[in-house]
Amino acid sequence: MDPVELLQQVNALHQTTFTLVEKYSDGEQGAFAITDHLNRRWVLKWTPEARNLQWMQGAKTVADLLRSLGYPAPYYLLIGKIPAGIYSIQSVLPGFPMRHLLPALLPRLFELNELQVGRAISGRKDWHQEVINTVLFGGDGYCLHASLQQHSPVTANLLQTLQTLVIAHQDEPHRTNDIVHGDFQHSNILIHDEQISGIVDWDGSCAGDCTFDIATLLFYSYDVVEVRERLWDYALKRASLRLLSMYLAHLILRQVDWSLRHHDLATSERYINRGLVLLGAK
């Protein structure tokens, strides 16, 4: 849906006067900068074809809970559903998406991860089962298997290796009651004055083991040796290597599939190679 048309519908439903400023360049989904009648900035998030409004309300509950603990999560001003999908309007947090994860930022990220421990709310998706299902059967609009099966023998074999790994370790004991962000990577971590100023995009948060979020950072920061080693050390104190290998299997599939369908060949090859390296790393 055209964002101007979307805002017109939002304004009509809530008797507001939001206006569109721009589409955010970071991120793969629909996020737009808007202003209200006092010229204050907000973020409009748009999920086309979504139907589960209760799920988005749960994301608001998660963000409110974390914010009450001192976690830099956004405030959800409005949530609603129209026939074409679900929208939310959220507060703008200071800063810009992190480009590189510097070692100096790791202690604060570990502190934030600790705040997610044992805080899961009822009704959120079981993330551990989602990891298993996506690798073995594919996900809903992501973690698709056909892209890897059809791209090359290397990616077809990569998928088989990931599936074999998950089958072997799917019953590994794991935490079930943490808040899991689910996409805890650079574009969702904001930096201001060289400090972490916000963690955004809680719409997909689930219940499970928040060490998955550390594994996500590991996957996307793997080329920086000091960061990689410190993330490995922290993660291995919280979860077994077998469990971490499952998390990384999901992340490899997720990113390789997405890149094959949406990015250029060089980007796809970079993540294919990273997946192959990770499978032999530990």
Image: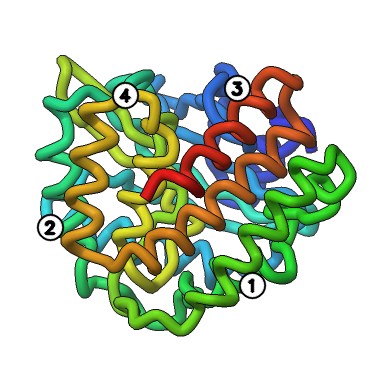
| Mark toward the viewer: 2 or 1 | 1
Report x, y in % for residue 107: 10, 39
Q: Amino acid at mark 2?
A: Leu
The answer to whether residue 133 is left or right of residue 250 is right
Give whichever of 28, 239 is nearer the camera. Answer: 239
Residue bearing mark 3: 23
At mark 1, the secondary structure is helix
At mark 2, the secondary structure is loop
For residue 94, above or below residue 63: above
For residue 27, above or below residue 86: above
Identify the residue shown where x is 12% and y is 39%.
108
Q: CA distance from mark 4 to mark 2?
A: 31 Å
**Residue 224, label in figure:** 4
**Residue 69, label in figure:** 2
Categorize mark 4 by other alpha carbons within 10 Å: few (<14), some (14-19), many (20+): some
Q: Amino acid at mark 1?
A: Asn
| Mark toward the viewer: 3 or 1 | 1
Tell me which numbered mark, 3 or 4, is placed earlier along the sequence. 3
Identify the residue shown where x is 43% and y is 34%.
220
